[in-house]
Image (cartoon, rainbow, N blue to C red):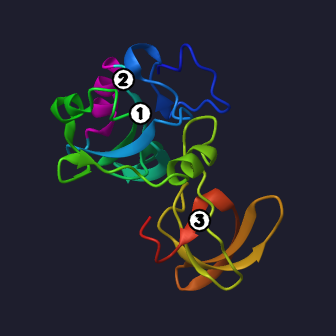
Amino acid sequence: MVYFEDVKPSRRSPAVVGTSKGGGTFPSDSNNKWFAVQTSPNREKLASFHLRNQAFLTFLPVRRVTRRHARRIDTVLRPFFPGYLFISLNIDVQRWRSVNGTVGVARLIAHGEVPTAIPTGIIEALLDSCGVDGTVRWRPDLCLGDSVKVIEGPLTGFVGQVERLDDAGRVRVLLEVMGGRVPMLLSHDCVARANSGL
């Protein structure tokens, strides 16, 4: 992946890639704002690659997903927002209309003819929650008794109930397995609320 070349951001993340040459500047510039880009289906990485080639700064947040296929279980990175990525632009200076003609891009989200900026703080919060590998470390607020679903690892898809939380980032869950409840100690990142859609 390509990292920033001429700027030194406070937090480097593989999910945020780009260059400061040719108009792509770090979003801490007061004139740059984040915008959403809708991509063609399953073309988020391709769109990000081609936007970077045009010297735009992009952010594609990803999450780990465990998949089962042909008796194999593996973990892959998937977009946190399927079909979307984010781009930092100064629409008064940069040629932002070229974004719509980029390979893999369906359109730059706009209201009428003008791109719609994402409110300040949202993308910054996502950037702060990214780990070293670029994955979003999303930690839902869980309470004792909450119904949760395992979203990572060999137990993906199993549903259970939170029995205990600890300060080390682990969750003790009573998983419903074969008609009974089995206690399991899991990482906080491996579970999500059962109704969260993950």
For marks 2 and 3, give the CA distance.
Answer: 33 Å
The residue at which mark 3 appears reads as 191
Q: Are marks 1 and 2 in contact (CB under 8 Å)?
A: yes
Queried whether the magenta region covers residue 127, the answer comes back as no
Q: Secondary structure at mark 1?
A: strand
The image shows residue 29, relative to residue 176, as above or below, that is above
Q: Secondary structure at mark 2?
A: helix
**Which residues lie in the magenta part?**
43-54
The image shows residue 49, relative to residue 134, as above or below, that is above
Q: Secondary structure at mark 3?
A: strand
Whichever of labels 1 and 3 marks the residue nearer the N terminus, that label is: 1
Whichever of labels 2 and 3 marks the residue nearer the N terminus, that label is: 2
Report the amino acid beneath label 2: Arg
Queried whether the magenta region covers residue 50, the answer comes back as yes
- Determine the image quadrant of residue 160: bottom right
Whichever of labels 1 and 2 marks the residue nearer the N terminus, that label is: 2
The image shows residue 144, relative to residue 101, as above or below, that is below
Across and down, in percent, residue 89 comes to 38, 34
Report the amino acid beneath label 3: Val
Circle 3 residues within 10 Å: few <14, some 14–19, many ≥20: many
The image shows residue 36, relative to residue 146, as above or below, that is above
Locate the C terminus and report the quarter of the image it occupies.
bottom left
The residue at which mark 2 appears reads as 52
The residue at which mark 1 appears reads as 58
Report the amino acid beneath label 1: Thr
Circle 1 residues within 10 Å: few <14, some 14–19, many ≥20: many
Please state which of residues 144 and 128 is positioned toward the viewer in this rendering.
128
